[in-house]
């Protein structure tokens, strides 16, 4: 598996470097080449995960970080088919490379848990919702920088590669809508299929996930009913994402790394 790991890391970094060209030397980024390289990186990353765990899902802390990074990178490439968001790869692709490297080279060995198809469905929905909402949160951050740059009449090349402000905001809300729908299905499937919440230390995850669902639900309602946008929408998006991160990775960090218990 090490050749796949090294290949994925190198390809992620190469794709990010190609996309960062406007910032580095002012020349236009070779987007088609960068996206092709990034696609190969995601395929190598996914193959490494599948082969390392023989097709099973490993949801321990560092393995889960690597898995979600792969999902977010893949979703970024898919979203780019509709809107030019490849510039996000300057941030996301090196992060995916770093999380893959930590999982393979620094994390302690773990054993994937045996999961039936219902739980695998629940996890898949959770990964997709988390990935879409993560991209939306990153767009929310970049919206803030775009707005400030427009006010100062100085737009960095990296931000200029994104869609115009209104289109970026519209895309952010579409991603939030899709992520919210998937998060709703995640909570529903969890209620139907997950048992023994207390034994599995899942109560805190469930409560925080519901809180995040409420934040995103209020944001979408406010957008539909009162036309919320700008800073209000950005801060609610980031708040919802922060709660969602705590729901999964915060609890896993405490259980697995501090308390040394499986969670």
Image (tube, rainbow, N blue to C red):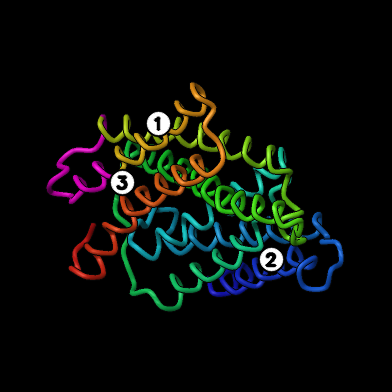
Q: Which residues are magenta?
A: 192-208
Q: Please give left or right for residue 7 compared with residue 154 in the image.
A: left
Cα–Cα span, label 2 and label 3: 35 Å
Q: Quadrant of residue 62?
A: bottom left
Residue at the spot of label 2 = 16
Mark 1 against mark 2, which lies toward the viewer?
1
Residue at the spot of label 1 = 218
Q: Quadrant of the C terminus?
A: bottom left
Residue at the spot of label 3 = 115
Mark 2 against mark 3, which lies toward the viewer?
2
**Residue under the image location 55 percent in, 64 percent down:** 96
**Residue under the image location 33 percent in, 52 percent down:** 248
Q: Quadrant of residue 93?
A: bottom right
Residue ranking furthest to the right: 27
* C-beta proximity under 8 Å, tags 2 and 3: no
Q: Secondary structure at mark 2?
A: helix
Q: Quadrant of residue 148?
A: bottom right
Give whichever of 36, 31 is nearer the camera: 31
Cα–Cα span, label 3 and label 1: 33 Å
Question: In this picture, is 72 found above or below 116?
Answer: below
Q: Please give left or right for residue 198 compared with residue 63 in the image.
A: left
Residue 207 magenta = yes
The local crowd at label 1, few if under 14, some if 14 to 19, many if 20 or more residues have their Cα within 10 Å, is: few
Give whichever of 223, 231 is nearer the camera: 231
Mark 3 against mark 1, which lies toward the viewer?
1
Cα–Cα span, label 1 and label 2: 35 Å
**Residue under the image location 45 percent in, 49 percent down:** 238
Give whichever of 136, 89 is nearer the camera: 136
Question: In this picture, is 197 found above or below 248?
Answer: above
């Amino acid at each position: 598996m090490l050749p796949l790991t090294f290949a994925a890391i190198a390809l992620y970094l190469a794709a990010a470097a190609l996309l960062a060209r406007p910032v580095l030397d002012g020349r236009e980024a070779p987007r088609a080449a960068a996206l092709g390289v990034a696609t190969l990186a995601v395929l190598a990353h996914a193959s490494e995960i599948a082969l390392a765990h023989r097709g099973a899902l490993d949801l321990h802390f560092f393995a889960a970080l690597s898995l979600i990074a792969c999902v977010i990178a893949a979703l970024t490439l898919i979203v780019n088919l509709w809107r030019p968001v490849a510039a996000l790869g300057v941030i996301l692709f090196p992060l995916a490379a770093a999380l893959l490297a930590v999982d393979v080279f620094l994390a302690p060995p773990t054993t994937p848990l045996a999961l039936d198809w219902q739980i695998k469905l629940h996890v898949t929905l959770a990964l997709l919702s988390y990935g879409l909402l993560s991209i939306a949160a990153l767009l929310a951050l970049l919206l803030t920088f775009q707005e400030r740059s427009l006010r100062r009449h100085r737009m960095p090349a990296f931000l200029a590669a994104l869609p115009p402000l209104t289109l970026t905001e519209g895309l952010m809300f579409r991603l939030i809508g899709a992520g919210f729908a998937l998060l709703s299905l995640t909570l529903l499937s969890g209620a139907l299929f997950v048992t023994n919440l207390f034994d599995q230390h899942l109560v805190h995850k469930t409560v925080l996930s519901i809180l995040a669902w409420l934040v995103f639900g209020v944001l979408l309602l406010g957008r539909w009913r009162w036309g919320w946008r700008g800073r209000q929408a950005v801060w609610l998006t980031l708040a919802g994402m922060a709660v969602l991160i705590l729901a999964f990775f915060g609890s896993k960090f405490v259980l697995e790394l501090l308390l040394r218990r499986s969670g």
